[in-house]
Image: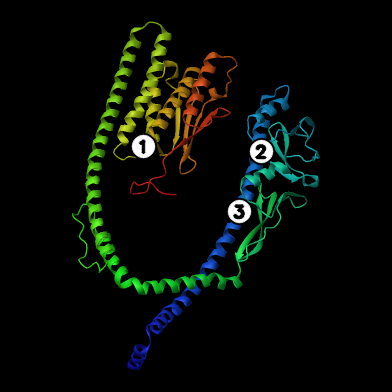
Amino acid sequence: MISRLRNWFDRLTTAGKLLVLMSAAVLPLGAVLIWAANSGIEQANAAVSARAADQSRAIARAVDSRIARSILALRVAANGAFREGGPDLCADVAQALFSSPNVPQRFTLRGNDGTLLCVVGDLGQQRPTLLVRPGEVRLWIGPNGSSVYYRVGVQGGIATGALTREELSDAVTATSVRPVSASVTDGTGTMQLSSAPGRRAPQALQAEIVRASHPIAGQQLTVETAISMERIASVDRLIILLPVLMWIAAALLSWLLVSRFLIEPLRRMQRAVSAYEPGSGKLELPTRLGAAEEIRELGSAFQRAVERIEENEHQMADALEGQRKLVREVHHRVKNNLQVVASLLNIHSRSVESQDARDAYASIGRRVDALAVVHRNHYAELEANRGIALRPLLSELAASLRGSAPETARSMEIVLDLESLNSTQDVAVAVAFLTTEIVEHAMLNEPDEAVQLRLHRTSDLTARFTLASPILTDQADGNKERIQFERIVGGLARQLRSNLDKGPGTYGVDLPVFPPFSSDGSTQKS
């Protein structure tokens, strides 16, 4: 049987032989490709479905976050106003809300028995008989679905606020998701957040609406979304596969023509290049590189390029080692010089009689110590090439500040809550000076109160640094020392390219940090 087939094949013309070979090669590959394309389409459709679900959850999270942020801001402001018990509660709450970005300024305050105390803004229709206990939150949809009302109970009264349809629609728009429709319902009323006309899908795609519901705000509200998903229709799969099959046929024909003179020599050269290890000596290529002169010239070019790369790598390695030694020496000398300056300041402070002069020497010394701590930690991390570790730096700086504190502040506590993060020297210097300024301000004005330092990663490349102390609640009010303090810490925050977020008794900034390191010491890629 085999002999007859061989004789028949030998009698065919070259074109016939090529047709038989192409048919025998293409038909099995075509069947495999059809199966693979069908699997790929199914996976693509599944991925589109998952993307629609993610978009729906993103809308729900955005709406929930906007509502939760507004509730929290109103609760904090109302708690503070009722606790202070000022003559104008609404003015106190409005002032507190004004400092919170993207928080509605419309609210009402009532007593524990529901008595209306004051109103700011137009809230529209409310539920005056609905009472809530301290710590409790109730939400509902207003008439005609124009607003979402939230009522929070605080110590001493009840506060009510509202988010309009436009404000919640802005939260949906900020997600960059364009749903067919999105709405919020409490079971009786519904607020329509967005509605977009359906888009016409391309010919090879089939539009489908995916609807989903997500409870938010402690199960009191539900976000309902409709996302347009474009699936690949089954009838169009053959049209997608035909160009692929045509390309395969043309590629196989080209391969049959050039494999003997081009592909095999190149494969032998590729295996030799892949097996080559830098630094192992000269690149040895196979002696059989085909009949083409261009391939032999390419092999010679490879050898020359490898030799040049090896030579350049040796030069770069020598230069890098010299640079490392120079940088280590510079940081070592800077650290020593700063320590000398700190010692001189300490010696001079002992010889002066004025307390103001001694305080000035101590203040300057603390800043020099802060910079010396940065250089000492940078010098320690040079070998690992990971930047400066902020946790040991801040720990050492806190110990140094406690050690240099005046007698009245020796018992002041510095509480540390720090993650192990690394950053650049510029960031470390700004962080050290910012910490020194705030801790020194606290130890000179509130020596009996603790200072808290918190550092936590917020993403692969950013972290949140927060300093908390009761002294940070005070306002400047014309105090020159306080005004100078605010100007300094604001400048340090700008050096970090971050806004200085001021809260009740807290200052916070965002820091750039290095990504997490893997177990082998390399940076993990996100």
Q: Are marks 1 and 3 in contact (CB under 8 Å)?
A: no
Q: Amino acid at mark 3?
A: Gln
* Distance in Å between CA atoms under marks 1 and 2: 39 Å
Q: Quadrant of the N terminus?
A: bottom left
Answer above or below: position of 336 versus 143.
Answer: above
Name the residue carrying label 2: 70
| Label 1 secondary element | loop
* Distance in Å between CA atoms under marks 2 and 3: 23 Å
Mark 2 or 3 closer to N-term?
A: 3
| Label 2 secondary element | helix
Residue 447 seen by the camera: no
Residue 502 in picture, x, y percent from top left? 56, 29
Name the residue carrying label 1: 387
| Label 3 secondary element | helix
Quarter of image, res 13: bottom left
Residue depicted at x 54% and y 24%: 472
**Along the line of sight, the residue nearer the viewer: 435 or 409:** 435
Q: Which label sits in the foreground, 2 or 3?
A: 3
Q: Amino acid at mark 2?
A: Ser
